[in-house]
Amino acid sequence: MGKILNKTEASKKSKKPEQASEQDSTVTENVAKVYLEVYRNCKLGMENIKAAKPQVQDQSLIDLFNQQYKGYETLAKEVELKATVEDKQLEQPGILSKAWLWGEAFFNALKDKSASNFAELMIQGINSGIINLTRLQNQEKGQANNEILVKLMDQYQNNFTMLKSFL
């Protein structure tokens, strides 16, 4: 009696070897894109928190920033591990991105050091991250393992919910 194949197995068996290797190569590239984008977003979130935290005077917001930082850091380490196992290269966010974040936090703190202002800045960063990840998700259309991407999206949603109370 024959084995029942799932869709992935069936599509691989029906394709010529060169087609299967092209598809495998595309999936590998897509996984690398997802890892890189999630890693970059985690690192930027961490940098944003590091830039804003010294200016914040509200201890409960500082505690929330610490919690969010740990979440980004944990996910970044998970991506690093997966990338290492799969022999993928990750890049740190560029120096210009970091400088922009630090400058924005500094200048916004000069005009308004309220918890509400810092919560709003962080929410804007979260919205930007959600837009980037949603675009990537739409481009990939299931061609890459989006589990790690979904984890960051969930974290963004949770962070957003917690920051709303400071507005």
Image: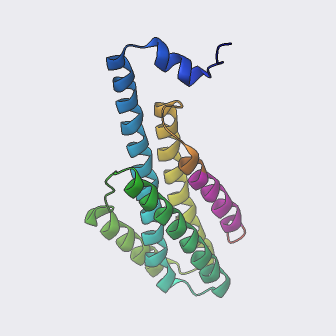
Quarter of the image where the N terminus is located: top right
* Residue farthest to the left, as pictured: 95
105 displayed left or right of 68: left
Percent x, y of residue 9: 54, 22
Foreground residue among 125 and 79: 79
159 drawn magenta: yes
Q: Residue at x 58, y 68 (%)?
A: 71
Q: Residue at x 44, y 61 (%)?
A: 81
Picture quadrant of residue 69: bottom right
What range is drawn magenta here? 151-164
Note whether 44 is above or below 69 in the view shown.
above
Picture quadrant of residue 18: top left
Percent x, y of residue 143: 48, 31
Q: Residue at x 58, y 65 (%)?
A: 120
Note whether 88 is above or below 70 in the view shown.
above
Q: Main secondary structure of the magenta part?
A: helix
Note whether 28 is above or below 112 in the view shown.
above
Q: How is the image coloured?
A: rainbow
Percent x, y of residue 78: 50, 61
Note whether 134 is above or below 4 in the view shown.
below
* Residue farthest to the front, as pictured: 1
Quarter of the image where the C terminus is located: bottom right
52 drawn magenta: no
Foreground residue among 86 and 51: 86
Percent x, y of residue 156: 60, 57
Q: Residue at x 51, y 33 (%)?
A: 138
Count all numbered tags in the image, as a single digit.
0
